[in-house]
Image (spheres, rainbow, N blue to C red):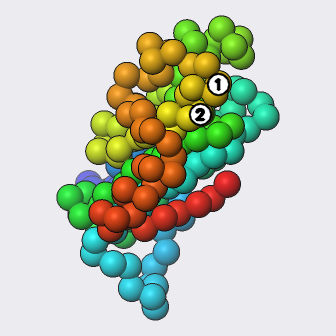
Amino acid sequence: MKKLLILLLVLFLIATSLTVSAKRLIEGYGDFKPVANTSFKTPKKVKAVFDVYTSNQDNEELNRGINTVARFLNMHIDAGVKKKNIKAALVIHGKAGKDILTNSAYDKRYISDNPNAELLKKLHDAGVQIIVCGQTVEFRGYKRDEILEFVDVSLSAITALISLQSQGYQLITFN
């Protein structure tokens, strides 16, 4: 009986050590691979603004640029950077402008729910400042009540990017 208990304990410890998953701030999004023993040290504080201006042709597909923000947060949390030391902002413009529409506004135009709405809400809840270019909003004819309520509207993407960079945010473009 004692040997059986020891064997079960050993098997349990092996099983739990194999199923340890990476730490995440944004569950369900931002997949990444942990990297052990890096020779380039990860900074203890990071501050980035993501410039996203492209979107997918498939209107039911998640915008990869927006998902990159989740990956940025997740991999830095997993690498040991404290949440209080991670600042992120997302500036959306151009073709990506449609990705900040409410589900009802998106459905009117693309006959589906906005595949980015849930991720954007999770990013906002995690402290990411989300800004849409006012020029994109106006040129595309989006009404303010068609934009997700937590998204800020700036005069332009240029204005938001200049302002955030002057506050120490580093510009990241993956489009």
**Which residue is located at x 51 percent, y 51 percent?**
158
Percent of width and height locating residue 25: 35, 49
Where is 115 relative to 110, above or below? below
**Which residue is located at x 47 percent, y 21 percent?**
147
Q: Disc 2 vs disc 1: Cβ atoms closer than 8 Å?
A: yes
* Residue 141 location, quadrant: top right
For label 1, the residue is: 140
Percent of width and height locating residue 133: 51, 38
Report the front residue among 158 and 12.
158
- Taking the view exactly as shown, the residue that stands out farthest to the bottom is 39
Whole-number angstrom distance, CA of label 2 to CA of label 1: 6 Å
Percent of width and height locating residue 13: 34, 61
Report the front residue among 135 and 41.
135
- Judge whether residue 21 can be spotted in this image: no
Q: Which mark identifies residue 136? A: 2
Where is 41 relative to 132, above or below? below
